[in-house]
Amino acid sequence: MTKNKKHKKNIYLSRGALKSAISRLMKSKPKAQFHAKQLIRKLKIKNSSPQVVEMLKQLSDQGIVRELEGGRYIFAQGKERYKQASVAQGYVDMIRSGAAFILVDGMEQDVYVPRSAMGGALHGDLVEIEYRGRKGSRPDGKITKILDRAVESFQAVIREQKTGYTAVVDHKGKVIDIRVSNYKMWPTLRTGDPVIIRITKWSEDRNEDHLGVVTTLLGDMPMDDIQMTGILLSEGFNLEHSPAAQKEAEALPSQVTITDEDLAERKDFRKVTTFTIDPVDAKDFDDALSIEKHEDGSYTLGVHIADVTHYVPYGSALDEEAYDRSTSVYLVDRVLPMLPEKLSNGLCSLRPHEDRYSYSAWFTLDEDYKVIARSFGKSVIHSDHRFSYGSAQAVLDAGKGEYHDELSLLREISRKYRKARFRNGALNFETDELRFKLDDDGNPISVYTKERKDTHLLVEEFMLLANREVATYINKVSAPAPPFVYRIHDLPDEDKLQDVRLFALEMGLELKFDHPKQIAKSFDKLRKAAKLDPRFKILEPMGIRAMSKAEYSPDNIGHYGLAFDYYTHFTSPIRRYSDVLVHRILESVLHGQGQKYKKPQLEKQTKHISRQERKAQKAERDSNKYFQVKYMKQYEGQTLQGMVNGMIEIGFFVEMTDSKAEGMVMWDSLDEPYELESSRLRAKARRSGAIIKVGDVVTVKVREANLESRKIELDWVGPAIPEDESSVDA
């Protein structure tokens, strides 16, 4: 009698892992020719043929494989390989030394470019590079051409010279001299004045300055305004909308007037109880909710979204401006909107007690809240009430109040959906989101973490539902599915996950990351452990960094973090251009108007939108950092408690318990030398043997909170906490 052999199940590989697997296999069989289905069988993977073909084309672009007739590929040999891969395009990611890594789409590793080979390129620029082989384990190259500048306007300081004025810019650590061509327009200009300057001519000669014009004097502006201006400009965001976009916005009517012609083309929800739930200080209301119970026990759930496309026609100046920005930028004390305020806070915003054009997704639910039918289309709504998260929560907590029954029912439905999502393997990441309370002068008087209440989770769940259902509908409406904008999230980086595992093990917590569902369970275990022991909260940011970054793409690979096969962004078109694209594509599909966008066009647009999203996130982090440092100014010279949350060669970082502000203690400021272990989890004093380790609660004194550098310098106060051999088993 023979025993049944256990066959290893085919697995789904992330894009990075898939590309590596294909490359390794083809390198091991350099004379063999493969097509996509053969590779799927050989590698024993669940990935689809289109996904494998996409990876093969990327490997072909890099010169690693060569395409043959009939969709077959072969490994590219020797000189042929380097010849094909000699030139590429990518975006500059500068580091402090002045060198950079070039982010080349489709390459597993970024290409390193030394400072001497930068060719005048700056952070964020689109460049052409010449691939020069490898130095050690990394690809090496030089920049041969600057294709597109990421930033044109800079914050600078004026320096007076004999022949005029120069504006000196410190951009990401690189100093740029710009000769001011319009200094006669500013008779009060003096050395040391802060200004905004726009470069009008980039010089390719190292011995010549760039030319620029001063557009704004910043000298009389408050420090906060100067700093926030610098943050926005450094990420390439213009402070004003283009004149053409502003002109189009000004030409729009001041009031919304719904006509009979509109109603003939839209579903009328104005008699259905509808309300918005947003932050207390929000002015742009993207989404509203409605719920109706029917006599047969079924329900109609409505998710109503601002119809931005009604006011922003395809190809208009407003459309081009919205695409260029791609996102609103939310700093601590201000918002830089994607659309002019007449649209974002006015005509498009779903304000209470006013008729509004909307785009709705409405769902029929059975008695168990299961979705049994779904519909999408342009609509008209009338919001009956504007809730803040807090005021809606107060109604739920009190068990009575305006629209209590609707809120209570929505909460019940959302809880069921949320539980189902986590059962299906969704990750439960709830990192601390900082909030600042500012006084009338804009000074931070308190720092706190945003509390996620039932109302936050309620709104989040229904936005997820609408986003998922729209993407699913697009994929089911025809075969093949039309080109579309997906919100995708790849599998985590295996090496980074192992770093998290080792870090957690060092702290006494065992996590396992052998397969996707185990990853979700381990992060849930970490979340629960952090609630019992704050030390484990420092692992959550590490876990997030191990995750792939969610991005936009016309190539769907699903959303790993949400455990959705299909996902998009449909619910925030006032602040995200991706959602504007989704509305247009959905509308064209619903009315059989053919393909609104071609895939190559969407590939270009989704890459741009993803880059703009990352820039906005960086600006928001820098804004938070500035206000944290500003808040800490009042504690200079005082002793505070914090937690060690990281170590590098020159010092260790401490996160303050209350403000979450991070400062550094330099090793050379301690009473004796310390030796940092290779794991960077602990350091040991050479003489006394005292230990400082990540996760320690320590006492420090705030030496300086520097607003210009946005850095906090700390002095060590308490003795190193003795090494604790005990562990926590959470």
Image (cartoon, grey):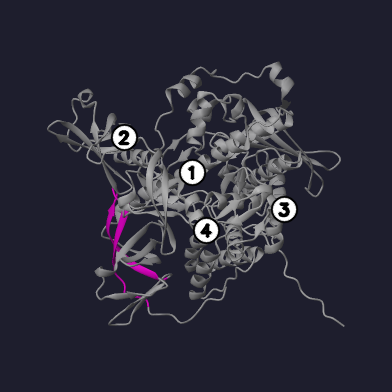
Discs 2, 3 touching: Cβ within 8 Å:
no
Q: Position of residue 521 (x, y in %)?
A: 63, 65
Label 4, label 2: how far apart the Cα atoms are: 39 Å
Determine which of the numbered discs, if any, sits on residue 544 in the image: 4
Q: Nearer the viewer, residue 226 or 99?
A: 99
Residue type pointed to by label 3: Lys
What crowding class fits label 3: few (fewer than 14 Cα within 10 Å), some (14-19), or many (20 or more)? some
Query: Which residue, given by chain and number where applicable, does mark 3 sit on?
Result: 416
Q: Nearer the viewer, residue 459 or 249?
A: 249
The numbered mark, 4 or 2, whose residue comes first in the sequence reads 2
Helix, strand or loop at disc 2? loop
Discs 1, 3 touching: Cβ within 8 Å:
no
The numbered mark, 1 or 3, whose residue comes first in the sequence reads 3
What crowding class fits label 1: few (fewer than 14 Cα within 10 Å), some (14-19), or many (20 or more)? some
Q: Magenta segment: does it hold 720?
A: yes
Q: Position of residue 429 (x, y in %)?
A: 57, 57
Residue placed at 39% from the left, 38% from the top? 149
For the residues carrying marks 1 and 3, which lies nearer the camera in this image? 1
Quarter of the image containing the N terminus? bottom right
Q: Position of residue 339 (x, y in %)?
A: 50, 30
Residue placed at 72% from the left, 29% from the top? 269
Residue type pointed to by label 4: Ile
The numbered mark, 2 or 3, whose residue comes first in the sequence reads 2
Please state if 444 lies on the left or on the right of 359 as rendered. left
> Among all residues in the image, which is located at the extreme left?
162
Label 4, label 1: how far apart the Cα atoms are: 19 Å
Helix, strand or loop at disc 4? helix
Helix, strand or loop at disc 1? helix
The numbered mark, 1 or 2, whose residue comes first in the sequence reads 2
Query: Which residue, given by chain and number where applicable, does mark 2 sit on?
Result: 202
Residue type pointed to by label 1: Arg
Range of magenta residues: 696-721
